């Protein structure tokens, strides 16, 4: 029964996979060539992203109250953002960021386009469509996190605790995959999933993801 949903998740992720050459910052970090200031900006921007995404996923879970599979998916994402926020604090400290700097930091618009659009989806997107779009984006984000986690250890001397934020997103999440598959299948079975809209949402999420990294690479 889940074959159709599984195939759709896989094909959508493949269709929306970003051009590997489009992200010029992660390869720099991978070589140890990115500055510590850039890593600090990454931590500071993620503070804003994680806080916003947590609220967006919680709102999506509430909106999906009549769709238990989608609600479970978004509830799991909400819990994940809470855990990620705790790990992010340690990464920020390892980058030399203190609370005074964090409070004074002015976020870059290009980095905050992604969470702003996710917030738009939380208000306007059908839950099943958003499940498919968000899931497609996770593959690229997880790959970036795996690369960064390795580089932080190998080139920057960060501890495992300081790398835990990126490890968290890089590791496989079979339970989340199961919930995504169930949510998409339920949407298909009920005729609630619009593949065209889901693809559009996913395409924009990937574009804003690319803008995040491009902005960090070339801050105004």
Image (cartoon, helix red, strand yellow):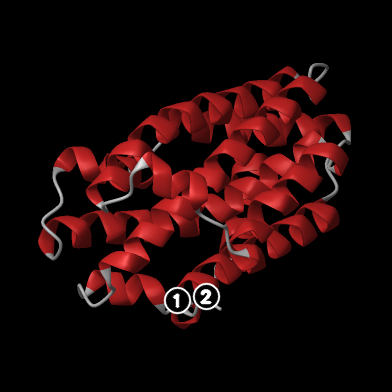
* Quadrant location of the N terminus in the rendered image: top right
The residue at the point 48 percent across, 30 percent down is: 80
Number of other residues with Cα within 10 Å of mark 1, as a class: few under 14, some 14 to 19, many 20 or more: some
Q: Quadrant of residue 53?
A: top right
Depicted 70 relative to depicted 135: above or below? above
Location of residue 150 with respect to 81 vertically, above or below: below
From this view, report whether residue 71 is shown above or below residue 93: above
Which residue is depicted at the point 25% across and 54% down? 149
- Residue position marked by numbered label 2 in the rendering: 214
What is the quadrant of the C terminus in the image? bottom right
Apparent side of residue 34 relative to residue 137 in the rendered image (left or right): left
Q: CA distance from mark 1 to mark 2?
A: 5 Å
Is the C-beta separation of discs 1 and 2 under 8 Å? yes
Q: Going 84% across and 38% down the picture, which residue do you hit?
A: 123
In-front residue for pair 198/87:
87
Closest to the observer, 171 or 162: 162
Q: Is residue 121 left or right of residue 45?
A: right
Q: Secondary structure at mark 2?
A: helix
Residue 8 in view here: no
- Could you say which is closer to the camera, residue 24 or residue 35? 35
């Amino acid at each position: 029964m889940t074959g159709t949903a599984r195939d759709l998740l896989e094909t959508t992720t493949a269709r929306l996979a970003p051009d590997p050459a489009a992200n010029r910052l992660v390869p720099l970090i991978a070589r140890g060539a990115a500055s510590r200031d850039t890593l600090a900006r990454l931590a500071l921007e993620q503070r804003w992203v994680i806080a916003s995404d947590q609220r967006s996923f919680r709102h999506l879970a509430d909106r999906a109250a009549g769709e238990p599979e989608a609600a479970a998916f978004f509830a799991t994402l909400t819990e994940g953002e809470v855990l990620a926020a705790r790990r992010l604090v340690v990464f920020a400290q390892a980058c030399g960021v203190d609370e005074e700097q964090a409070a004074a930091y002015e976020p870059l618009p290009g980095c905050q386009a992604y969470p702003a659009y996710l917030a738009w989806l939380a208000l306007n997107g059908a839950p099943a469509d958003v499940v498919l779009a968000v899931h497609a984006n996770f593959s690229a984000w997880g790959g970036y996190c795996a690369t960064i986690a390795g580089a932080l250890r190998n080139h920057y001397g960060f501890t495992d605790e300081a790398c835990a934020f990126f490890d968290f997103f890089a590791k496989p999440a079979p339970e989340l995959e199961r919930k995504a598959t169930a949510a998409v299948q339920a949407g298909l079975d009920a005729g609630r999933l619009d593949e065209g809209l889901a693809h559009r949402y996913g395409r924009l999420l990937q574009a804003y993801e690319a803008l995040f990294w491009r902005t960090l690479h070339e801050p105004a």
